[in-house]
Amino acid sequence: LRALFPAAGALQVKQDPGEVQVAEGDRVALECQVLTTEPWERLRLEWMKGQEELCTIILNCSSRAPHTRCPLRLRPAWNSSRATLSLRRALGSDAGLYLCRVTLEI
């Protein structure tokens, strides 16, 4: 299989923390580390809550300055290979399962 798809396994995504409990009004930061073995042209990182896309960070290889599309109360950041999504004041409606989804264009 690797001979047919040499880029398979070229992307690894780690999300932290695995589980967190936050009281209403607290600040919370979710992290997503993206490790690649191949050079990439464009990287799209989406923060999902259930099936809903909350926030998107798009990076182009040539600029490295991220383009973000997020609601004002969510603060995305990108530093080297790590994305962070911060909520300054958590609300009860923020409870749920969050997922960092990464699409890489090689």
Image (cartoon, rainbow, N blue to C red):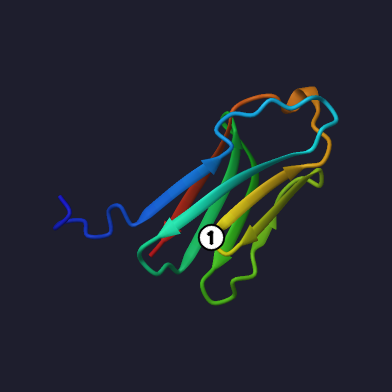
Foreground pick, 9 / 49? 9
Q: Which residue is mark 1?
A: 81
Q: Quadrant of residue 53?
A: top right
Taking the image as shown, residue 89 lies to the left or right of residue 50, namely right
Q: How many marks?
A: 1
Position of residue 99 measured from the top left corner of the image (x, y, whole percent): 55, 37
Taking the image as shown, residue 98 lies to the left or right of residue 11, namely right
Position of residue 92 measured from the top left corner of the image (x, y, whole percent): 78, 22
Residue at figure coordinates x 21%, y 56% from the top left: 5
Amino acid type shown at disc 1: Ser
Q: Quadrant of residue 52?
A: top right
Position of residue 89 measured from the top left corner of the image (x, y, whole percent): 84, 36
**Residue 82 versus residue 38 in the image, above or below:** above
Quarter the C terminus occupies:
bottom left
Residue at figure coordinates x 70%, y 24% from the top left: 95
Residue at figure coordinates x 59%, y 71% from the top left: 64
Q: Quadrant of residue 50?
A: top right
**Residue 13 versus residue 105 in the image, above or below:** above
Single out the residue that lies furthest toward the bottom.
Answer: 62
Mark 1, secondary structure of its residue: loop
Residue at figure coordinates x 79%, y 25% from the top left: 23
Q: How many residues crowd around disc 1 within 10 Å: few (fewer than 14), some, or many (20 or more)?
A: few
